Image (cartoon, helix red, strand yellow):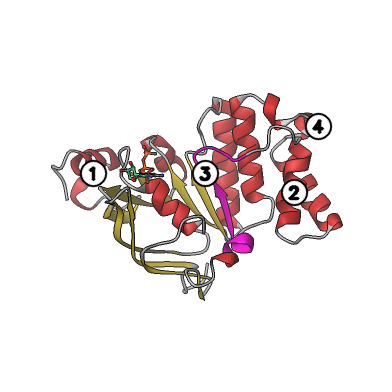
Amino acid sequence: MTDTPLLNVTGLSRRRAGRAAVADVSFSLNRGEVLGLLGVNGAGKSTTLSMLAGALRPESGGITLDGRDFVADPGIAQSLVGWLPEAAPLWPELSVDEHLLAFCRLRGASRAAARKAADTIIARLQLGDLRRRLAGVLSQGQRQRLGVACALVHEPALLILDEPANALDPVQIGELRKLIRERAAAGVAVILSTHVLGEVVAVCDRVAILHEGRLRHDAPLRDDAGGKTLESTFFGIATGAGA
Ligand SMILES: Nc1ncnc2c1ncn2[C@@H]1O[C@H](COP(=O)(O)OP(=O)(O)OP(=O)(O)O)[C@@H](O)[C@H]1O
């Protein structure tokens, strides 16, 4: 980990359907850090993550990634960011193997480099048995694992996972947790959005809570100042009873 944050977000705002979906959100994230992002339905998590992935333009505010102005040059997301959106965007007629090759090739990797990266991630995520299976016939959990593989295959510096444990069985949830900690140990900064508080406790270093588009809490997970549990902090904010 270095002293300079990988990601700096300042005053990020975006309206959707005429309403503030994300309002004046600021935070930073170090290399090797895993941030859990919590919030009730509609709190603004996916909108925030879409902006950090370069898929949605902020209306105002700044994002720097690895010291570069991300808002001015969202193209840097291609190499620096890996994103698993809420619904992994897969092509039903392409196989697992073809997906991984395509994700690498679209980012400018040579055929040989794409082959090597695909083989590495297939081995790490134990997708070997599925490599020739078409995405359109995968089970929901298998699709989710392919989505995680696509987010990771180009070895991004920032990994954004929106509800990654969706549809995974308990064995795969354990594997996912291991994978996240392994990537963090290798210096990758991770943002994990979830509705499962236990998921945050199991893998995150820090937790941020969004409510009505605003960042209402951002603190280390083990910071038990005031003796509050994550659950009481979350419900306090969600019900309007807490800070
Ligand atoms: N494509 C869209 N068009 C219009 N409004 C949208 C769109 N996407 C999101 N919104 C609105 O923006 C606000 C924030 O939504 P967002 O999806 O970011 O919340 P979320 O915290 O990810 O919610 P959830 O936990 O339900 O996935 C909500 O009020 C939502 O209705």
What's the distance in space between the residues labelled 2 and 3, CA to CA? Answer: 17 Å
User: Which residue is label 4 attached to?
Assistant: 132
User: Which residue is label 3 attached to?
Assistant: 85
Kindly identify the amino acid type of the residue bearing the numbered disc 1. Answer: Thr
Region rendered in magenta: 77-89
What's the distance in space between the residues labelled 1 and 4, CA to CA? Answer: 46 Å
Residue placed most toward the observer, 225 or 12: 12
What's the distance in space between the residues labelled 4 and 2, CA to CA? Answer: 14 Å
Kindly identify the amino acid type of the residue bearing the numbered disc 4. Answer: Arg
Relative height, residue 234 to residue 117 (above, below): above
- Tell me the mark number nearer the camera, choosing from 4 and 2: 2
User: Which residue is label 1 attached to?
Assistant: 233
Kindly identify the amino acid type of the residue bearing the numbered disc 3. Answer: Pro
Kindly identify the amino acid type of the residue bearing the numbered disc 2. Answer: Ala
* Residue 113 placement (x, y as % from top left): 81, 57
Q: Residue 23's quadrant in the figure?
A: bottom left
Q: Earlier in the sequence, mark 2 or mark 1?
A: 2
